Amino acid sequence: MAEIYVSVGSNVEPERHLRAAAVALADRYGLLRLSPVYRNPAVGFEGDDFLNAVIAFRTEAPVTDIAAALG
């Protein structure tokens, strides 16, 4: 079984979008582990700060299937 790490982040309604990402991944892959959430300034453009985190889960799904689901 593979351990998968997904970096998530948003500066547009970030609390809502990060929560939605975690719910969608949990619905598909089950138990998740979440890093702390970090606030980072936008780089290279003017914009609101980003909220960023990493979500980890274990799965037997092929990496190509996971990449397609995330795309």
Image: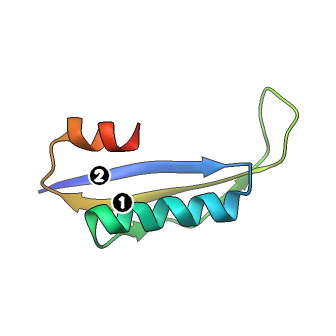
Circle count:
2
The answer to whether 54 appears left or right of 59 in the picture is right
Q: Secondary structure at mark 2?
A: strand
Label 2: how many Cα within 10 Å (few below 14, some 14–19, many 20+): some
In the displayed image of the protein, which residue is found farthest to the right? 46
The answer to whether 14 appears left or right of 67 in the picture is right
Q: How is the image coloured?
A: rainbow
Residue type for callout 2 = Ile
Label 1: how many Cα within 10 Å (few below 14, some 14–19, many 20+): some
Q: What residue lies at 38% left-to-right and 61% top-to-bottom? A: 25
Determine whether 47 is above or below 13 in the image.
above
**Which quarter shows the N terminus?**
bottom left
The residue indicated by pointer 1 is 56
The numbered mark, 1 or 2, whose residue comes first in the sequence reads: 2
Residue type for callout 1 = Ala
Determine whether 40 is above or below 29 in the image.
above
Are circles 1 and 2 on residues that touch, CB within 8 Å?
yes
- Towards the viewer: 28 or 3: 28
Determine whether 15 is above or below 39 in the image.
below
| Image mark for residue 4 | 2
The answer to whether 4 appears left or right of 21 in the picture is left
Q: What residue lies at 27% left-to-right and 63% top-to-bottom? A: 29
Q: What residue lies at 53% left-to-right and 50% top-to-bottom? A: 8
| Image mark for residue 34 | none
Q: What residue lies at 48% left-to-right and 56% top-to-bottom? A: 54
**Which quarter shows the C terminus?**
top left
Measuring from the top left, give residue 67's x and y in whole percent. Answer: 31, 38
Measuring from the top left, give residue 62's x and y in whole percent. Answer: 15, 42
Displayed quadrant of residue 63: top left
Measuring from the top left, give residue 38's x and y in whole percent. Answer: 66, 59
